[in-house]
Image: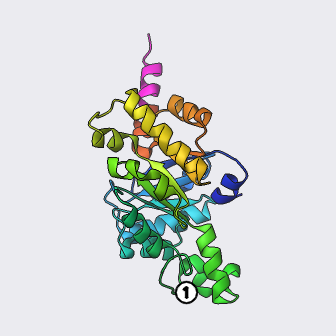
Amino acid sequence: MDLIEKFENGKQTIGTFLHTKSLPVIEALGFSGMDFVAVDMEHAPLSTDEVSGYLTAAKAAGLPAIVRVSSGSRENILHMLDAGADGIIVPNISTVDEVKELVKHAKFMPVGERGFCPTRDGGWGFAEHAQGPLTEYMEYANKNTLLLPQCETTGCLEHIEEITAIEGVDGILIGPFDLSISMGIPGEFGNPLHVKAIKRILEACKKNGKLAMLFVGNTARGRQAFEEGFDSVIYGLDLSVLVEIYKKAVSEIKAE
């Protein structure tokens, strides 16, 4: 069952951000029970060629892979979708018009204006879903690749009801850190204003039938997010999780 099927069937999903330049890490995550990996081109120095290799490794591991691009340009979105990304996260969105442009880049007609070429996502034209009429492939791609604008600015928050209602937007990833900074309350996740903002985004997603995803820095917040009704969480960064695990091991081994 892929990510979209899990969402449609009410299954909650967990992923993590990849920052390491390592194919074996992708392969290892395939054994972790994670539902997906989010390859982060915004905050990690990853090239298009490197990410293309990670997408191949993820597919071989049976692990759905979403890419967070550095910006919402046509080039960034198109390259990652053509390379086989199961979804695209676009950071730093502020306006409704920006989101409408993202839909143009990420979705084929009649929803958007994505450019066509027989590339990896369709097995260069030989995958089962790409062998029929072009219209069938376009419909398949529109349904089976996620477009997830990231709500992390006050501008996006102020227009979240309209943004989540846009056809072609499949869901929203909330970036709680940057959202708190944009709101002038950096890191104050318990601040009533921040709590209210998170709830507002969640409710907008639910109202419009869109995937509600939240970045969480610890497992307790992840459990809480699921209890609140979020469909998906991205738990931590691979490097920070690695440090946490080894710190815990060192502490336990050296415990007196």
Is 149 left, or right, of 222 in this rendering? left
Picture quarter with the C terminus: top left
Task: Say which residue appears at 37% left-offset and 65% top-offset.
Answer: 98
State the residue in front, 22 or 126. 126
Please say which color scheme the image uses.
rainbow
* Occupied quadrant, residue 60: bottom right
Q: Is residue 210 magenta?
A: no
Is 48 left, or right, of 54 in this rendering? left
Give the secondary structure at mark 1.
loop
Residue type at mark 1: give it. Answer: Pro
Task: Say which residue appears at 47% left-offset and 70% top-offset.
Answer: 103
Q: Is residue 255 magenta?
A: yes
Q: Position of residue 189 (x, y in %)?
A: 39, 31
The extreme bottom residue here reads: 133
State the residue in front, 87 or 49. 87
* Occupied quadrant, residue 100: bottom left
Name the main secondary structure of what is drawn in magenta: helix
Please rate how many residues cluster around mark 1, counting C-alpha atoms within 10 Å: few if below 14, some from 14 to 19, many from 20: few
Above-or-below relation of 115 to 92: below
Task: Say which residue appears at 40% left-offset and 71% top-offset.
Answer: 101
State the residue in front, 125 or 92. 92
State the residue in front, 245 or 70. 70
Residue stretch in magenta: 246-256
In the rendered image, is residue 189 in sight?
no
Picture quarter with the N terminus: bottom right
Q: Position of residue 124 (x, y in %)?
A: 57, 85
Q: Position of residue 26 (x, y in %)?
A: 52, 56
Residue occupied by mark 1: 118
